[in-house]
Amino acid sequence: MKIPTTLKHKPVVVVENYEEVDGRMAYHSDAKGLSLGLAQWNDRGKVDISAKVWRYTGEKWSRQSEELPLHRALDLAILISQARLYFREAYRFPKLYEEEGGPVARVGLQGDAMTVDICRENPHIDEDIALFYQALAQDDEMLGERFRVLARILREMGY
């Protein structure tokens, strides 16, 4: 299915077969494509690039399609990576986290740091973190493949 080019987000680089590789939803996903392009929120004289996940309901392009500035897409990749790193050692804690502990990590960005932590305010955190841990373990092979691809590309870029 072709990504629309007549909407406010103007695609430049596209993945039009994303539904075939969308993790556990592969071949059954409503996320039909990904694109990098000119952001829909651009003002006259100001151009931002965004990443977009294109969803299709079977009848029309969904309002649930998401558009993110590129730095936010990378910030999500950083958060996913940091969470996976944390959960490699989380088995050491009886509840998979330190109840009174500090943040999981502080990731330096632009002179400050993104604080990654467990949401201890969640009243169901004990149950939810166990389910999260289980789902992360279940998806380990799929995520690992993507991490390896990302690491290879970053090495090729000189990082």
Image (tube, rainbow, N blue to C red):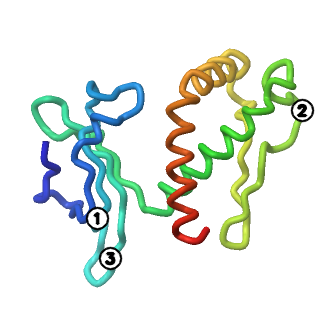
At x 68%, y 18%, the residue is: 130
Secondary structure at numbered mark 3: loop
Q: Is residue 139 left or right of residue 85?
A: left
Q: Which residue is mark 2?
A: 100
Q: Judge whether 103 appears above or below 98 on screen.
A: below
Among the two numbered marks 1 and 3 on one chain, the one whose residue lies closer to the N terminus: 1
Q: Are marks 1 and 2 in contact (CB under 8 Å)?
A: no
Mark 3 vs mark 2, CA separation in Å: 45 Å
Q: Is residue 15 left or right of residue 130?
A: left
Q: Judge whether 152 appears above or below 39 on screen.
A: above
Mark 1 vs mark 2, CA separation in Å: 43 Å
Q: Which residue is mark 3?
A: 47
At x 36%, y 62%, the residue is: 50
Among the two numbered marks 3 and 2 on one chain, the one whose residue lies closer to the N terminus: 3
The percent coordinates of residue 113 (x first, y second) are 73, 61
The percent coordinates of residue 146 (x first, y second) are 50, 43
Residue ranking furthest to the bottom: 45
At x 86%, y 25%, the residue is: 92
Which mark is nearer the camera, 1 or 2?
A: 1
Res 131 → quadrant: top right
Q: Nearer the viewer, residue 50 or 134?
A: 134
Looking at the rendered structure, the kind of residue marked 2 is: Glu
Secondary structure at numbered mark 1: strand
